Amino acid sequence: MHGLIALMELQASRFAARVDAAGRPILLAAQDRSRWDAGCIRRGLVALARAEELGGADGSYVLQAALAACHARAEHYDATDWTRIVALYTRLADVAPSPVVELNRAVALAMRDGPQAGLDALATLVDEPKMAGYHLLPGVRGDLLERLGRLDEARAEFEQAAALAGNARERAFLLERAAGLRHPD
């Protein structure tokens, strides 16, 4: 129970910073952390500590809360402990295996080891049937390809992600990212 409470509080702490005034998504790296709710973070960290004290450190909710706590504890995006996040996703993959956990682990690997490491980790997910309609897979691939300077491939991935996105604001955000990668004529 404490793990679930920790997860809910820590995730709720970022709600105000996740979208702009028009409702467009704001990536974690660009979020204004001063808009994160300090009370939610404090309550979440207390609940996480209690869950760990009670021996639940390897529970799915506790691991997810520990991941959110890594972000909450970092004063700014560049201070994020990506090594710990990779380790937590590795443990979560053992406890609650899923392609979405592997996708998130690949993102953390990319942040720790570079975009090629993330792309390599995503290779096993490209043909995963459960990921066929999941817009975040091509979205992440697009981001990593952009970071590698492979702009044509990145644009195609963002366009595919937009076609799969379930809401108009995410679709528009992804199409804006794709359009921003056009080579000047």
Image: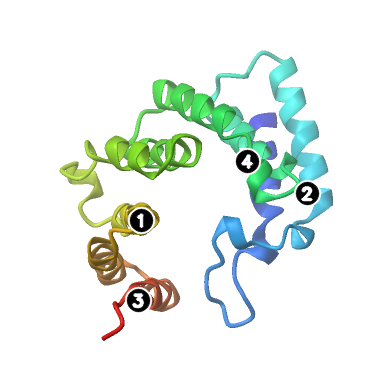
Left or right: 108 in relation to 141: right
Q: Is residue 144 above or below residue 105?
A: below
Question: Which amino acid type is shown beneath numbered disc 4?
Answer: Ala
* Residue at screen point 39% across, 38% down: 106
* Residue at screen point 23% across, 45% down: 130
Q: Position of residue 35 (x, y in %)?
A: 76, 63
Circles 1 and 3, Cβ within 8 Å, touching? The answer is no
Question: Which amino acid type is shown beneath numbered disc 1?
Answer: Leu
Q: Position of residue 65 (x, y in %)?
A: 62, 35
Q: Check disc 1 and report its element: helix, strand or loop.
A: helix
Q: Check disc 3 and report its element: helix, strand or loop.
A: helix
What is the spatial separation of the Cα atoms under label 4 and label 3, in whole angstroms? 28 Å
Few, some or many residues within 10 Å of mark 3 (<14, 14–19, 20+):
some
Question: Which amino acid type is shown beneath numbered disc 3?
Answer: Leu
Q: Position of residue 113 (x, y in %)?
A: 45, 34
- Of residue 183 and residue 48, the one placed in the foreground of this image is 183
What is the spatial separation of the Cα atoms under label 1 and label 3, in whole angstroms? 13 Å
Q: What residue sits right under mark 4 in the picture?
A: 68
Chain-order first, disc 1 or disc 3: 1
Which is closer to the viewer, label 4 or label 2? 4
Left or right: 10 in relation to 99: right
Q: What residue sits right under mark 1 in the picture?
A: 136
Q: Is residue 102 above or below residue 34?
A: above
Quarter holding the N terminus is top right
The numbered mark at residue 175 is: 3
Q: How many marks?
A: 4
Chain-order first, disc 2 or disc 1: 2
* Residue at screen point 34% across, 73% down: 181
